[in-house]
Image: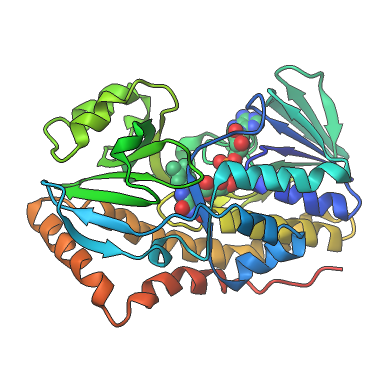
């Protein structure tokens, strides 16, 4: 079995690892010129996530690269702390930079002989009863038995095999922007957050992230994707107080991440010899804190079911979807609530939420919030594949 995986983020290398262990030939094509560096943090929560990392033999290495990020302090307009959320409430059991995670997963596949092709992308898929002919932007066309789209929220494989993004990507009413800011604006190993009517400004710094970063959330209508990102951000945060004007001075387009907070909802994750994995097929959105866990668990189950089906890819894909869908949909339901809470509409709702944030550290059930995500992952019963 020769499998093409599009995307060397989190899901792609994790799938490559398991398929290669099972004896398949694997090629990974990645649009970026190399493995990404820097970037945002992702987290793993609960036994299901940790046990997949353990089975891959990377858990210790992942633990060694924890961000070490501490608490998040909510502040008022004058910068006075009004509430503190302990790290374990939002950072899961292990928080790690996505770039560190990607490199660890990539390095786990290197000795197994996975072929990586950076700086290229799939441009066309032609399926026939015996396989898929794949055209690339740079390399000559090639035949594969199966093609897996692990190419994220704006998946090219999904667009080619299932149809345009608008059919499946659901905007949750807000955008997120992240960019580096001068070090003195970020408190060491912790974050400061300021919430004003329907907008949130967070600035933080962790031992591993290097420079400080600002993370902004703001409401946007459907179709805001095409807008000039810098202009959109400056307009949204005009007149917003605290240190926001100083953060915006650092916004120069370099290293700027800006995207819609969105989910991927699909009636089916596979068609013929093509299937989707991770954010490409079922992104719960970046506010869920569940995307990286879904990606590694999904990779384990997809590879396991494909190998167990003994060449019957349709049966393997169907079993993968049956096992993973309740988990993915649970994560998506939770994330919708997070998105609504992130940018409440109006001053009254904002004031109420700020009051609630003040109380969270004292709530007897505060661990329930942290445990909700762990319980969501328990919706999947991990089979022990041979
Ligand atoms: C700002 C932000 C904060 C987040 N916070 C968290 C968090 O706290 N906890 C958490 O669990 N998750 C978080 N996530 C989500 C998490 O990063 C993703 O859910 C996870 O990385 C999914 O992995 P993936 O491999 O499916 O997709 P990605 O990690 O997005 O990887 C997709 C890969 O495909 C490549 N690619 C894209 N298009 C093409 C193409 N046409 N051809 C070839 N390659 C292509 C990309 O370059 C990328 O390397 C966050 C995401 C963002 C953006």
Instruction: Write down which quadrant ligand 1 falls in.
Output: top right
Question: What residue lies at 21% left-to-right and 62% top-to-bottom?
Answer: 83
Image coords of residue 97 (percent x, y): 54, 46
Query: In the displayed structure, does residue 204 sit left or right of residue 79?
Result: right
Question: What residue lies at 79% left-to-right and 19% top-to-bottom?
Answer: 139
Question: What residue lies at 46% left-to-right and 57% top-to-bottom?
Answer: 289
Farthest residue toward the bottom? 364
Q: Work out whether residue 275 can be spotted.
A: no
Residue 384 appears in which quarter of the rendering?
bottom right
Query: In the displayed structure, does residue 67 sit left or right of residue 180?
Result: right
Residue 378 appears in which quarter of the rendering?
bottom right
Question: Which residue is at the front of the view, 320 or 273?
Answer: 320
Image coords of residue 272 (percent x, y): 74, 45
Against 24, residue 257 (above or below) is above
Q: Work out whether residue 90 can be spotted.
A: yes
Image coords of residue 298 (percent x, y): 65, 57
């Amino acid at each position: 079995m020769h499998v093409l995986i599009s995307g060397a983020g989190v899901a792609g290398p994790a799938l490559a690892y398991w398929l290669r262990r099972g004896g398949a030939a694997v090629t990974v094509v990645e649009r970026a010129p190399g493995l990404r560096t820097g970037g945002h943090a992702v987290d793993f929560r609960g036994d299901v996530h940790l046990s997949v990392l353990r089975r891959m033999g990377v858990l210790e290495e992942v633990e060694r690269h924890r961000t070490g990020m501490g608490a998040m302090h909510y502040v008022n307009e004058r910068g006075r702390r009004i509430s503190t959320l302990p790290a374990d409430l939002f950072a899961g059991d292990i928080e790690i930079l996505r770039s560190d995670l990607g490199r660890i997963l990539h390095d786990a596949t290197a000795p197994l002989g996975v072929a990586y092709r950076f700086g290229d992308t799939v441009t066309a898929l032609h399926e026939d009863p015996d396989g898929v002919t794949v055209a690339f932007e740079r390399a000559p066309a090639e035949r594969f038995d199966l093609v897996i789209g692990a190419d994220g929220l704006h998946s090219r494989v999904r667009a080619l095999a299932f149809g345009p993004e608008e059919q499946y990507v659901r905007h949750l009413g807000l955008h997120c922007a992240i960019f580096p800011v001068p070090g003195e604006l970020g408190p060491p190993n912790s974050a400061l957050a300021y919430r004003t009517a329907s907008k949130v400004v967070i600035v933080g710094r962790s031992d591993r992230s290097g420079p400080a970063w600002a993370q902004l959330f703001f409401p946007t209508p459907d179709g805001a994707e095409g807008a000039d990102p810098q202009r959109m951000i400056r307009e949204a945060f005009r007149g917003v107080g605290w240190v926001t004007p100083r953060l915006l001075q650092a916004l120069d387009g370099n290293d700027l991440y800006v995207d819609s907070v969105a989910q991927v909802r699909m009636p089916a994750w596979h068609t013929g010899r093509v299937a989707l994995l991770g954010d490409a097929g079922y992104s719960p959105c970046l506010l869920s804190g569940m995307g990286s866990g879904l990606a590694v668990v999904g990779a384990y189950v997809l590879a396991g079911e494909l190998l167990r089906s003994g060449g019957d890819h349709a049966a393997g894909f169907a079993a993968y979807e049956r096992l993973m869908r309740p988990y993915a949909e649970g994560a998506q339901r939770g994330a919708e609530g997070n998105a609504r809470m992130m940018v409440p509409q109006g001053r009254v709702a904002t004031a109420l939420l700020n009051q609630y944030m003040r109380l969270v550290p004292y709530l007897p059930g505060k661990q329930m919030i942290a445990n909700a995500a762990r319980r969501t992952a328990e919706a999947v019963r991990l089979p022990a594949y041979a």
